[in-house]
Image (spheres, rainbow, N blue to C red):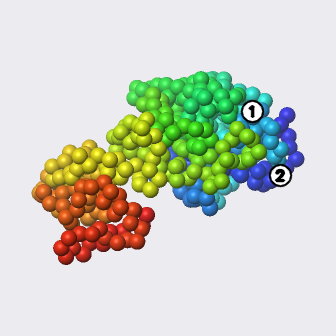
């Protein structure tokens, strides 16, 4: 049995924490559970503490694989069966021990647990289920648990595990079915979407049960998420963002995570050559656009289209949209509705709400906007207060873009005696 290995628990930890570093689903927990005095830990909505690794990735949990043994041969994965790498496997009790001891020392606030595929998806899912069950029932752990659901596993096991995890995720891996066929032939879109649908339906059902029965147990209270690898295949930003929008609408996902492709198998000819390293700037733009989808009421087809399928490398998606739709500007701060305020560069969700509330008591000025958190160095090109702009600027695309990208922190060339100094977009 694979669970019998000679490595010490710390040697396994070194191997399997490193093997999990390309999973990027560490965020605030999204659920709340108070300590009860007799069990270990609690869980807050504001969630798991955040820290960052040297390459900028979030590492807020004890993030490990149960094993890096895998029967699959996904070309982009360092743990694929054809790779000659050092292998290890945790037993469920070893993971429980690590989690409890790290939690007691205040090193972590929860567990992120995934795994390579041992023997079969169902065998793997059964081991993952047993781990989280033991953590909750035997060890009394009440901290945050994010568990990966294994595509192709017995739905009964996925359903049982969901009552012990706060969040579950099923990795989409690649944005399109064609990409999966090329780089992960053992996986199909059908087997990936099936547990996603199961988690969605059971989560919604459990919430309805809680409205009727106070003591009903909630299924994955923090919902589900997924992850896509960016840059391993030829999909455009427009295709990727459209897939994400579709997932949000059809599966009620909490988050879609984007992982810049890291070529760990450089000799594989089907993988793209990346002399400049992982496309981290592209990953960053997708996260910014994803935020616009979830909180700013944008649609994917508004930000990109077939003629312009990629994001601007130098302008964030919101600024890029604004300079391409100057016919909708300038926006009058004392009359514009909430949804239009959200489309102004430099105005966020909180500042838009503050503007709407402040207008009940009188007109707002540029000084008021600054106090409300509006980033005037971006917004000034697109707004007026009581019919006047902050400075006499031109609604000209080249002019605005040039000033937004002014890395020398020089103010725009205003007429008159204006002394405004504009910081660059990257300040």
Q: What residue is disc 1 on? A: 72
Left or right position of 85 against 379: right
Identify the residue shown where x is 57% and y is 51%.
Answer: 279
Q: Is residue 184 above or below residue 288?
A: above
Q: Residue at label 2?
A: 8
Q: Position of residue 148 (x, y in %)?
A: 62, 37
Question: In front here: 146 or 277?
Answer: 277
Q: Is residue 210 above or below residue 383?
A: above
Q: Residue at x 57, y 43 (%)?
A: 230
Q: Are marks 1 and 2 in contact (CB under 8 Å)?
A: no
- At horizontal 82% and vertical 47% (from top left) the residue drawn is 86
Q: Secondary structure at mark 2?
A: loop
Mark 1 against mark 2, which lies toward the viewer?
1
Instruction: Give the Cα distance between marks 1 and 2.
Output: 26 Å
Badge 2 density bin: few <14, some 14–19, many ≥20, Cα 10 Å: few
Image location (x, y in percent) of residue 272 = 66, 43
Q: Quadrant of the N terminus?
A: top right
């Amino acid at each position: 049995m694979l669970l019998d290995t000679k490595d010490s628990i710390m040697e396994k930890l070194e191997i399997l924490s490193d093997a999990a570093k390309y999973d990027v689903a560490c965020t605030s927990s999204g659920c709340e559970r108070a300590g009860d005095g007799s069990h270990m830990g609690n869980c807050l909505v504001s969630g798991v503490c955040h820290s960052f690794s040297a390459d900028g990735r979030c590492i807020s949990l004890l993030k490990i694989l149960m094993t890096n043994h895998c029967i699959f041969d996904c070309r982009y994965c360092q743990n694929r069966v054809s790779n000659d790498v050092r292998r290890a496997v945790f037993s469920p009790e070893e993971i429980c021990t690590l989690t409890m001891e790290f939690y007691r020392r205040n090193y972590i606030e929860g567990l992120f647990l995934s795994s390579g595929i041992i023997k079969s998806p169902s065998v793997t899912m059964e081991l993952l289920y047993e781990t989280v069950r033991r953590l909750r029932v035997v060890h009394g752990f009440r901290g945050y648990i994010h568990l990966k659901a294994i595509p192709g596993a017995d739905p009964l096991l996925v359903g049982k595990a969901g009552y012990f995890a706060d969040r579950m995720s099923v990795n989409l891996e690649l944005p399109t079915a064609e990409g999966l066929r090329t780089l992960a032939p053992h996986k199909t879109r059908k087997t990936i979407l099936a547990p996603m649908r199961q988690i969605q339906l059971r989560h919604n059902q459990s919430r309805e049960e809680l409205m009727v029965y106070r003591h009903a147990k909630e299924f994955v209270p923090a919902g589900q998420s997924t992850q896509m690898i960016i840059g391993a295949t030829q999909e455009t930003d427009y295709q990727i963002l459209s897939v994400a929008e579709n997932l949000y609408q059809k599966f009620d996902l909490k988050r879609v995570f984007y992982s810049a492709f890291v070529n760990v198998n450089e000799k594989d000819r089907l993988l793209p050559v990346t002399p400049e390293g992982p496309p981290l700037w592209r990953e960053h733009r997708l996260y910014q656009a994803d935020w616009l989808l979830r909180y700013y009421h944008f649609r994917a087809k508004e930000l990109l289209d077939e003629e312009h399928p990629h994001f601007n490398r130098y302008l964030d998606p919101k600024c890029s949209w604004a300079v391409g739709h100057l016919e909708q500007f300038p926006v009058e701060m004392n009359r514009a509705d909430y949804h239009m305020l959200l489309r102004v560069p430099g105005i966020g969700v909180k500042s838009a709400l503050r503007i709407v509330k402040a207008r009940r008591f009188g007109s707002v000025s540029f000084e008021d906007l600054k106090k409300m958190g509006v980033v005037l160095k971006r917004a000034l090109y697109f707004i007026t207060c009581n019919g006047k702009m902050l400075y006499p600027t031109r609604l000209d695309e080249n002019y605005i873009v040039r000033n937004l990208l002014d890395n020398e922190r020089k103010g725009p060339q205003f007429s008159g005696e204006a002394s405004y100094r504009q910081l660059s977009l990257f300040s």
